[in-house]
Amino acid sequence: MTQYQQLTIEEREKIQTGLWERRSLRDIARLLGRNVSTISRELQRNTAGERRRYVPRLAEERTRRRIQARGQRERLKCPLIREYAIRKLKDDYSPEQIAGTLSIEHLAYSISPEAVYQFIYAQYRRGGYGRCLGEDLRVYLKRKHKIRKLKYALFKAVKGPIKNRIFIDYRPQEVTTRIICGHWEGDSMVSRQSSAGLNTLVERVTGLMLITKIQNTTAAETTQAVIQRLKRFPMRLRQTITVDNGHENAGHEDIVKRIKTKIFFAHPYHSWERGINENANGLIRWYLPKGTDFATVNEERLREIEYKLNTRPRKRLGWKTPLQVFNQWVLH
């Protein structure tokens, strides 16, 4: 995309001449090799005075002041809050976690997550695409977007049928209400660079995450990974798993048979029915971005990521960590 260039003082003088000659805006735009909307905006912004006269020198000065002021409003003015936000960002906290823990650690202070986001993105001109005015704090966000943008749905993937599926409609109501611990969501993360992948399991109440490397995303490998990770928990803490319709979950009957954990399937293309797991996978991508070859990631690194995610304070847990809350359920 061609970068927009501000009008020069010479072009502004030609605009003034064109107005004196009573030329149309289209004629002036054609003369300058500019879009007519550029000329129209220039006149709307920089025509001043009671007589509504366009003066090139004044237009140039107004534009210069606007550019200098753009993005310059100071964010997080309190030094303590600013220092706290930067330190926590570098310690893998999200803006929401920063806002939640600030008022706990410093009772006299409070801030909103939006203020932290504005502080991060205010370092840049032109909405994130321009020159950096300070430290690049965007790199500490879990999703390193240059700008704050809307999310777009991915293309639907073709999924084959799996025998004897039990859909989410028949899942116990207590799973939906997220009152009782022991109900999980499962998914697979794939690598385009090799056949290796990751199996992820997230407990719905506590958010505890289990990450297991699998050599390939076959049903046999996935089934074994799920069984190995969940069998060490008491039966009451592994009652159900909700999964998608990928063929890696074709071994669901073996899981039910071997560890007595019931498997329920979300409806095809209804990713929000497993929203907790989808969000958790996004957090993993902060550590292992798209394009990472999972075959090169060792077990030690996966355990480190798993520990970091399970010891991050969560707003919905009253700023406790998933590991803290899950351990309370173990002792319950």
Image (cartoon, rainbow, N blue to C red):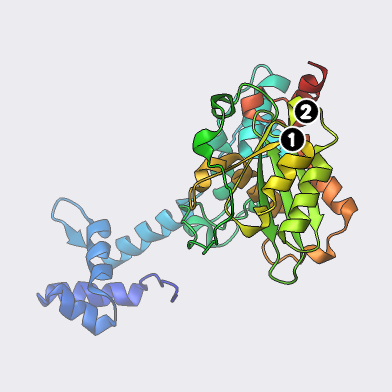
The percent position of residue 319, horizontal first and vertical second, equals 69, 25
What is the quadrant of residue 232 in the picture? top right
Residue at image location 58% in from the left, 55% down from the top: 162
Q: In this view, does 85 lie above or below 177?
A: below
Q: Is residue 129 left or right of residue 249?
A: left
**Do the numbered discs 2 and 1 sit on residues whose CB atoms are within 8 Å?**
yes
Secondary structure beneath dot 1 equals loop
Placement of 204 over or under 195, stated as above or below? above
Give whichever of 205, 140 is nearer the camera: 205
Q: Name the residue under label 1.
A: 260
Relative to 293, is 178 on the left or the right?
Answer: left
- Residue type at mark 2? Met
Q: Which residue is labeled 2 in the image?
A: 235
Q: Is residue 106 above or below residue 221?
A: above
**Which residue sits at x=75%, y=51%?**
223
Q: Quadrant of residue 101?
A: top right
Query: Which residue occupies the foreground of this view, 205 or 64?
Result: 205
Q: Image quadrant for the C terminus?
A: top right
Q: Where is residue 1 in the image (x, y as percent from the top left)?
A: 44, 75
Numbered disc 2: secondary structure? helix
On the image, the x and y values in percent for residue 41 come to 26, 62
